[in-house]
Amino acid sequence: MKRYNFTTFTNYNTSMDGHLTLKAVTRNNSGVYTVTVNDVKENTIGDKNIGGNRIFQKNYTLQVQEPVSEPLLDVSCLLDGGANIVCRTDVGDDPRFSIMVNGRFWLENSTSSRTVGDANEVSVTAASPGPWDITCSVRNRVSESETNKAEVICPGEYRSCWGSVIASTVGVDTGICPGDP
């Protein structure tokens, strides 16, 4: 004997061409549903139809996703004048990220490379000198959002020359390199 769990949706619309639209679904509604359509038979007993032939039956998988939140864009300057760019979303199922720098994709349609708690994030490193116009976008099957930062500049090129002023095992950044005037 097969056992069925029936779910009743109170917020739905049907159209004349057979589309069924469910409204106000939650993640708990995710699962496999069987839709069965029977033709109408004229024989009725009281208010009930006593039959009809099955004309259609198909299983559908419903996957409910939480929309993505507005992405957070963090830019950290590196010592060499480059930047570490992190794009993160705190909310949303199966986010896909893109990072665009100066109109060019550096990362496109990528899944999260790191999960921190419930947040998902990706990062890229800009080695070229700024300024940078940076766009971080995140999307999933039900929503999308983006954040921009314009004219991001990190300090110029950083030079480090290590000497042995204090001890041979401890380097001291003198800011003066061999061959400097």
Image (tube, grey):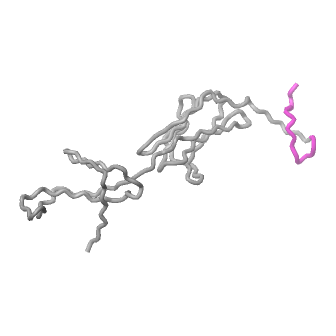
> Is residue 82 depicted above or below 17 in this figure?
above
Q: What span is colored magenta in the figure?
A: 165-181
Is residue 71 found left or right of 42 in the rendered image? right
Residue 147 on image: x %, y %: 54, 35
Picture quadrant of residue 180: top right
Query: Which residue lies most toward the bottom here?
Result: 1
Q: Residue at x 56, y 33 (%)?
A: 148
Residue drawn at x 59%, y 29% as measured from the top left: 133
Question: Which residue is painted at 41% across and 44% down in the image?
Answer: 142
Quarter of the image where the N terminus is located: bottom left
Q: Is residue 93 left or right of residue 168?
A: left
> Which residue lies most toward the right here?
166
User: At which x and y percent is residue 85?
Assistant: 62, 39
Q: Which residue is at the front of the view, 89 or 176?
A: 89
Q: Nearer the viewer, residue 159 or 37?
A: 37
Residue 65 falls left or right of residue 124: left
Position of 116 relative to 155 (above/below): below
Residue 107 in which image quadrant: top right
Q: In the displayed image of the protein, which residue is found farthest to the front?
A: 46
Answer left or right for 75 relative to 163: left
State the quadrant of the C terminus.
top right
